[in-house]
Image (spheres, helix red, strand yellow):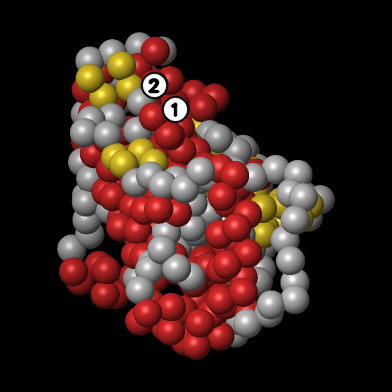
Amino acid sequence: MGRRLHEEKILPEQILDHLQHWFNEIKGDRNTQFYDPSWLSLFHIHRRVSSSFRRGHMLIAGDAAHLTSPLGGQGMNSGIGDAFNLGWKLALVSQGNADATLLDTYEEERRPVVDKLARATTQWTSILLGAGRINRILRRYVLLPMMRLHLVQGWVLSRRPALQESYRGSSLAPRWNLINRLIRRGPQPGDIGPDVHCEVLPDYQLVTLGTLINAHWALILFGILEKPAQLCANAAKTLLGTSIRVIRVTTKSHHSAAGYDQIVHDYRRELTRAYRAGRNTAILLRPDGHLASRSDDRDATTIMQWFDRVPGLHLPGQSTHRCKEVRSYE
């Protein structure tokens, strides 16, 4: 496609001539002519990441923190991801439920995601817009024909870095050991919680899990015995009050709603499969939709222990002993 615009330093009034030249070169069509454009502009692709996302009381997000190639359509989405990650942390700090050290986890979690996105979009930009004869041949005869295949399109959409963003390994999402990862294989702490359709009892209203939770904390209880489930639900409510939604997942058509915000009927096991949940799985979702913690033990103490590991967090009634009583029901 010829040399790139930013290398040629052309004038705005020369854009149309360059477009005409590129069209003739690519299509081999000498009859079609471009004329009388209503609007023309030069666009320069910038790829930059700030050296720091936080300095003292100042935090930056979105385009102020990072600029990437528009290829992949993730520029706005990555900024929204920044806002989701930072929003719930700022809320806890402003409400006096955490000190400012919690805000250090914002850059810790978001920078690896942004760096990964910047690398991916840079590679795609080089492939799709790169100059040189070899690039033009690969683009015209290999890449573009492949991109017309539905199978390839689906693979690209599912593999986009921003759609796979995970905070595994951060101080808020310690990695599972290898045995847990191999055996359970479900979403791990730091991963985005799958959003699937589910039915809410008693009227079997069909909603998505994301709509049910919205921007709240969520404790999702799969198959845990009723007494332990109730104790952990009460402990979660004590810690987070109205900020948390406690959801009981059941395959039964009737279930007591006492102590829970919602009862979800999962007779098709779509929700269970999405989270790879076992008979005693409990999932804690953060307000940004990422897994804070998961437990596959009958007492679900691991869920409450997560709050004790969060830097700077001091919620009302914070204590892991509230779930330890459930051991007596095993």
Q: Nearer the viewer, residue 116 or 212?
A: 116
Dividing the picture into quadrants, the one containing residue 212 is top right
Q: Position of residue 143 (x, y in %)?
A: 48, 81
Q: Amino acid at mark 1?
A: Gly
Q: Is residue 294 left or right of residue 308?
A: right
Kindly tell me whether residue 34 is visible in this rendering: yes
Q: Which residue is mark 2?
A: 90
Q: Which circle marks residue 87 in the picture?
A: 1
Q: Is residue 20 above or below residue 7?
A: below
> What residue do we see at 45% from left, 54% from top?
5
Q: Is residue 120 above or below residue 263?
A: below
Q: Is residue 290 above or below residue 186?
A: above
Q: Is residue 20 above or below residue 148?
A: above
Is the residue under label 2 in contact with that under label 1 (CB below 8 Å)?
A: yes
> What residue do we see at 25% from left, 67% from top?
180
> What residue do we see at 53% from left, 54% from top?
73
Disc 2 is placed on an element classified as helix
Marks 1/2: CA distance? 5 Å
Q: Is residue 208 left or right of residue 184?
A: right
